[in-house]
């Protein structure tokens, strides 16, 4: 999602790579679950999140849509996000003890928080969002340890590929008729989210295949 903010207003002014130390460690959150409430539609999910959730919970994307996730338009594209529910606007995966019930398969944004990504020139760097986590006295931790994601190199390539692909499509949709925009959105939803991923196979291989096919089709549509 595009954010029109100045980095100096929201960060400590530094950029980080996976091997850098950053003051992000909130000590296992210790009873705080502030960032699992009232997040609106901001915890946007990507294909890897859906692979993790559908494989880990052994459910379909459609089943998740029943009460765990929802679809919203992000800069012209329909994408899934975690659903907040109830009076306290809680993520439905937050348990009664205020802990994440799907910690091992939690979405990428939850792994990253309170870090963010700054995209530039076909790649990205990490940054620390200084106003987001409520915990004081956070300690230093290596970015890669904090993100807790296997095959981080592959993951970073995938994150870039997905981000810049969405950006390109979003740009093209701005100049496209409404009826075609709807059809493209349905096609992308089907290709990256509704079509089940094989849990026993590497996600990144499956994603790369789908991305190549989708790009071919979009090339025919957009020319
Ligand atoms: S606000 Fe910080 S301490 Fe609280 S749950 Fe989120 S990451 Fe943990
Ligand atoms: S998935 Fe887990 S960490 Fe992420 S918002 Fe929900 S409860 Fe919090």
Image (spheres, helix red, strand yellow):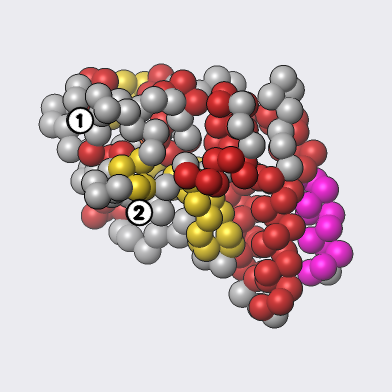
Instruction: Give the x, y percent position of residue 143.
Output: 39, 26
Q: Is residue 42 magenta?
A: no
Q: Can you say whether 214 is above or below 61 in the image?
A: below
Magenta stretch: dominant SS? helix
Q: Horizontal and vertical percent for residue 127?
A: 36, 40
Instruction: Say above or below: 152 vs 110.
Output: above
Q: Secondary structure at mark 1?
A: loop
Label of residue 40 in the image: 2
Tag 1 and tag 2, C-beta contact below 8 Å: no
Q: Alpha carbon of mark 1 to alpha carbon of mark 2: how far?
A: 18 Å
The residue closer to the viewer here, 184 or 13, is 184
Left/right placement of residue 205 relative to residue 21 reads: right
Specify whether residue 221 is painted magenta: yes
Q: Which residue is mark 1?
A: 32
Residue drawn 74% across the image and 57% down it: 187
- Image coordinates of residue 34 in percent, x first then y, are 23, 39
Dot 1 or dot 2, earlier in sequence: 1
Q: Is mark 1 within 8 Å of ligand 1?
A: yes
Instruction: State the SS at label 2.
Output: loop
- Pick out the residue farthest to the left: 136
Q: Magenta segment range?
A: 211-222
Q: Is residue 107 left or right of residue 192?
A: left
């Amino acid at each position: 999602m595009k954010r029109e903010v100045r980095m100096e207003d929201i960060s400590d002014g530094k950029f980080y790579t996976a091997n850098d130390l950053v003051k992000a460690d909130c000590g296992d959150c210790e009873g705080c679950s502030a960032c699992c409430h009232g997040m609106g539609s901001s915890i946007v999910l990507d294909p890897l999140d859906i692979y993790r959730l559908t494989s880990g919970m052994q459910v379909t994307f459609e089943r998740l849509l029943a009460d765990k996730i929802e679809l919203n338009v992000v800069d012209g594209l329909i994408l899934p996000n975690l659903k907040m529910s109830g009076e306290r606007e809680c993520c439905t995966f937050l348990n009664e003890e205020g802990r994440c019930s799907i910690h091992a398969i939690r979405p990428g944004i939850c792994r990253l928080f309170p870090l963010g990504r700054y995209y530039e020139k076909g790649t990205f760097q990490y940054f620390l969002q200084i106003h987001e986590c409520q915990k004081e006295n956070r300690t230093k931790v290596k970015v890669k340890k904090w993100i807790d994601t296997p095959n981080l190199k592959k993951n970073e390539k995938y994150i870039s590929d997905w981000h810049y692909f969405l950006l390109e499509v979003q740009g093209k949709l701005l100049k496209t008729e409404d009826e075609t925009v709807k059809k493209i959105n349905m096609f992308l939803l089907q290709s990256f989210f509704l079509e089940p991923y094989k849990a026993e196979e590497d996600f990144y291989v499956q994603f790369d295949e789908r991305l190549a096919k989708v790009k071919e089709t979009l090339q025919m549509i957009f020319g």
